[in-house]
Amino acid sequence: MRFYKLIIPKLSQLRKNADLTQLQVAQRMKLKPKSGQTFIARLENELIKAPRIDTILNYLDAIGVSWITFFTELSSERDKQEHDTFVL
Protein backbone atom coordinates (compact mmCIF):
# COMPACT_ATOMS: atom_id res chain seq x y z
CA MET A 1 0.00 0.00 0.00
CA ARG A 2 1.28 3.40 -0.89
CA PHE A 3 1.86 5.69 2.04
CA TYR A 4 -0.33 8.46 0.56
CA LYS A 5 -3.31 6.08 0.76
CA LEU A 6 -2.99 6.44 4.54
CA ILE A 7 -2.19 10.16 4.49
CA ILE A 8 -5.15 11.52 2.55
CA PRO A 9 -8.02 9.98 4.55
CA LYS A 10 -6.30 11.03 7.77
CA LEU A 11 -5.95 14.63 6.56
CA SER A 12 -9.63 14.78 5.72
CA GLN A 13 -10.56 13.25 9.07
CA LEU A 14 -8.42 15.76 10.96
CA ARG A 15 -9.94 18.67 9.03
CA LYS A 16 -13.43 17.49 9.95
CA ASN A 17 -12.36 16.98 13.58
CA ALA A 18 -11.12 20.58 13.60
CA ASP A 19 -14.58 21.63 12.33
CA LEU A 20 -13.09 23.33 9.29
CA THR A 21 -14.49 23.42 5.76
CA GLN A 22 -12.38 22.82 2.71
CA LEU A 23 -12.75 26.51 1.88
CA GLN A 24 -11.45 27.52 5.31
CA VAL A 25 -8.43 25.27 4.88
CA ALA A 26 -7.78 26.74 1.43
CA GLN A 27 -7.96 30.25 2.84
CA ARG A 28 -5.61 29.36 5.70
CA MET A 29 -3.21 27.93 3.12
CA LYS A 30 -3.44 31.30 1.33
CA LEU A 31 -4.97 29.76 -1.79
CA LYS A 32 -7.50 31.61 -3.94
CA PRO A 33 -10.97 30.80 -2.56
CA LYS A 34 -12.65 28.97 -5.46
CA SER A 35 -9.63 27.25 -6.96
CA GLY A 36 -8.25 26.58 -3.48
CA GLN A 37 -11.41 24.84 -2.31
CA THR A 38 -11.39 22.80 -5.52
CA PHE A 39 -7.75 21.86 -4.87
CA ILE A 40 -8.54 20.72 -1.31
CA ALA A 41 -11.51 18.68 -2.58
CA ARG A 42 -9.33 17.04 -5.24
CA LEU A 43 -6.68 16.30 -2.62
CA GLU A 44 -9.15 14.76 -0.18
CA ASN A 45 -10.80 12.70 -2.93
CA GLU A 46 -7.41 11.26 -3.88
CA LEU A 47 -7.48 12.85 -7.33
CA ILE A 48 -3.99 14.18 -6.62
CA LYS A 49 -2.15 10.88 -6.55
CA ALA A 50 1.13 11.93 -4.97
CA PRO A 51 0.80 15.23 -3.12
CA ARG A 52 3.98 17.16 -2.50
CA ILE A 53 5.31 17.13 1.05
CA ASP A 54 5.09 20.92 1.28
CA THR A 55 1.39 20.70 0.39
CA ILE A 56 0.84 18.20 3.19
CA LEU A 57 2.80 20.34 5.66
CA ASN A 58 0.87 23.48 4.67
CA TYR A 59 -2.41 21.58 5.05
CA LEU A 60 -1.38 20.41 8.51
CA ASP A 61 -0.46 23.97 9.50
CA ALA A 62 -3.83 25.17 8.22
CA ILE A 63 -5.74 22.71 10.39
CA GLY A 64 -3.50 23.25 13.41
CA VAL A 65 -1.91 19.82 13.58
CA SER A 66 1.78 19.27 14.30
CA TRP A 67 3.50 17.46 11.45
CA ILE A 68 5.58 15.55 13.98
CA THR A 69 2.47 14.22 15.71
CA PHE A 70 0.78 13.51 12.38
CA PHE A 71 3.63 11.47 10.91
CA THR A 72 4.32 9.67 14.19
CA GLU A 73 0.70 8.54 14.41
CA LEU A 74 0.63 7.70 10.72
CA SER A 75 3.76 5.59 11.07
CA SER A 76 2.20 3.70 13.99
CA GLU A 77 -0.94 3.04 11.96
CA ARG A 78 1.12 1.82 9.02
CA ASP A 79 3.17 -0.50 11.25
CA LYS A 80 -0.04 -1.91 12.72
CA GLN A 81 -1.52 -2.54 9.27
CA GLU A 82 1.65 -4.27 8.11
CA HIS A 83 1.72 -6.37 11.28
CA ASP A 84 -1.93 -7.35 10.86
CA THR A 85 -1.23 -8.33 7.24
CA PHE A 86 1.57 -10.68 8.28
CA VAL A 87 -0.36 -12.15 11.21
CA LEU A 88 -3.45 -12.97 9.17
Image (spheres, grey):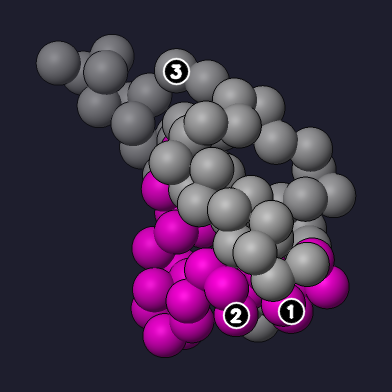
Tell me how far mark 1 sits from mark 3, CA to CA.
30 Å
Helix, strand or loop for the magenta stretch, by majority: helix
Look at the picture and state if 83 lies above or below 56: above
Q: Are marks 1 and 3 in contact (CB under 8 Å)?
A: no
Decide: few, some or many residues near mark 2? Use Cα within 10 Å; few <14, some 14-19, many ≥20. Answer: some
Looking at this view, is 62 or 83 the one in front?
62
Image vertical order of residue 20 relative to residue 46, above or below: below
Q: Quadrant of the N terminus?
A: top left
Per the image, label 3 sits on a secondary structure element best described as loop
Amino acid found under the numbered disc labelled 1 = Arg
Location of mark 1 (residue): 28
Mark 2 — residue? Answer: 24
Which residue occupies 79% across, 66% down? 31
Identify residue for label 3. Answer: 1
- Magenta segment includes 23: yes
Q: CA distance from mark 2 to mark 3?
A: 30 Å
Q: Amino acid type of disc 2?
A: Gln
| The one of 84 and 20 positioned closer to us in this rendering | 20
Looking at the image, residue 71 sits to the left or right of residue 76; the answer is right
Residue placed at 48% from the left, 81% from the top?
20
Please state the horizontal and vertical placement of residue 11, each as a whole percent of the image.
51, 57
Question: Image point 52% across, 20% down: which residue?
Answer: 2
